Image: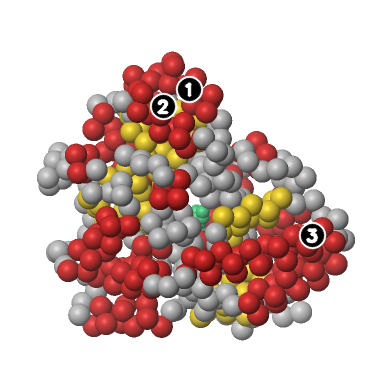
Amino acid sequence: MPVSISKQLFSQAQSLIPGGVNSPVRAFKAVGTDPLFIDRASGCRVVDVDGNNYIDYVCSWGPLILGHSHPQVVEAIVQAASKGTSYGAPCLPELELAAMICEAFPSIDKVRLVNSGTEATMSAIRLARAFTGRDRIVKFEGCYHGHADAFLIKAGSGLLTSGVPTSPGIPPELAAYTLVAAYNDLSSVEALFEEQGGDIAAIIVEPVAGNMGLVLPESGFLEGLREITTRYGSLLIFDEVISGFRVTYGGYQNLAGIKPDLTTLGKIIGGGLPVGAYGGSREIMDMVAPQGPVYQAGTLSGNPLAMAAGVTTLKILQSSNVYTELERRCARLTDGLGQGFAQFGENVAINRLGSMFSVFFTSRQVNTHEAVMSCDTGRYAAYFRAMLQRGVYYPPAQFEVSFVSMAHRDEDIEETITAARRALELLS
Ligand code: HOZ
């Protein structure tokens, strides 16, 4: 059998780029095969360099809620590029995106635009520390907030699949400032605050955990975090990089009716271009330079291309029944998949919220990090490969979320359900 072009490129890439990829999970290590090199993408489909066509449920890890190369988003980027790609100076599109974010989030009076979710979370922590005059932060096991030092302690996403939950290269003195609690377990948070509450600047949490697969907050969990942080004078930071504009227009906080002190965003607000943002009350945000002393800057921050893609995406999301439709399509998919799993006697738990879902290979309900870790990752890998062979591209790791976009039509969903049945036939 001839060696595929993807395989050849991956082999070259490994001599030029660490692990052959620019973000670890893309290397497909967790699913025991070689990565695809993508040539092009349109709607809900990606096409690799060998000409294979796949229905894509990775959707660039979340930003592409409208699907790949949405004509209006592409047009907005082209128009913006024709006027210059970056000014390193204020421009009108920044204002438009900032206004849309502030309007969509009751908790955000002011927002600072950056280039990635990682930048947003690390800046939010700096700000929380400055605002409270405290150094420690609390994060949750299995939550992932980008790759800044403070967050790579018992983190999710690529660290979870690689089995290295805490990265080397982080001085232990620094790591000691990050306290780790258990997601959906308020008593673990109480215990940390009872001991060190006076030193804790903030809790940072994915209100919907999306980096250990999809794990939903149990009733009272987020409310409890709000109460504890308020009681101890700490800040509550919602990392809505994934959930922002994914589950509703605005954030999960809009649905939950909880006001965090700071919110971090990324992905969808850039319409597929690199972007991030952090925002909160005027009082807190006015501490950011040049208004205040907390320094944070960026050459490409607020660049007109990302702003144009983001503004156009949000405008489309504002229109009509996008979220109802996304919900319907994703429910149709997970119902169909669930019936197939039941038919073949496969033990899975399917978690879904709006257009996000995860299929966990376990017989348990998955509501904690501990339950996540009970999954049969080998079975997921086999399922992933069987689906890939049948033209469906799922996240290449058990501990990531799948996304449905507005470009996934009913036909694509039915095709996926059929492919899944065939894959299970093979695996059973
Ligand atoms: N950490 C991202 C998923 N949770 C993966 C980013 C990427 O590989 O593009």
Distance, label 2 to label 1, CA atoms, is 7 Å
Q: Earlier in the sequence, mark 3 or mark 2?
A: 2
Q: The disc labelled 2 sits on which kind of residue? A: Ile
Residue 9 can be seen, yes or no: no
From this view, report whether residue 145 is shown above or below residue 396. above
Q: Which residue is mark 3?
A: 341
Q: Are marks 3 and 2 in contact (CB under 8 Å)?
A: no
Q: Which residue is mark 2?
A: 228
From the image, state whether disc 3 or disc 2 is nearer to you.
2
Q: Callout 3: helix, strand or loop?
A: helix
| Image label count | 3
Q: The disc labelled 3 sits on which kind of residue? A: Phe
Q: Position of residue 269 (x, y in %)?
A: 36, 62
Q: Position of residue 198 (x, y in %)?
A: 34, 19
Quadrant (top left/top right/bottom left/bottom right) for the N terminus: bottom right
Which sits in the foreground, 33 or 351? Answer: 351
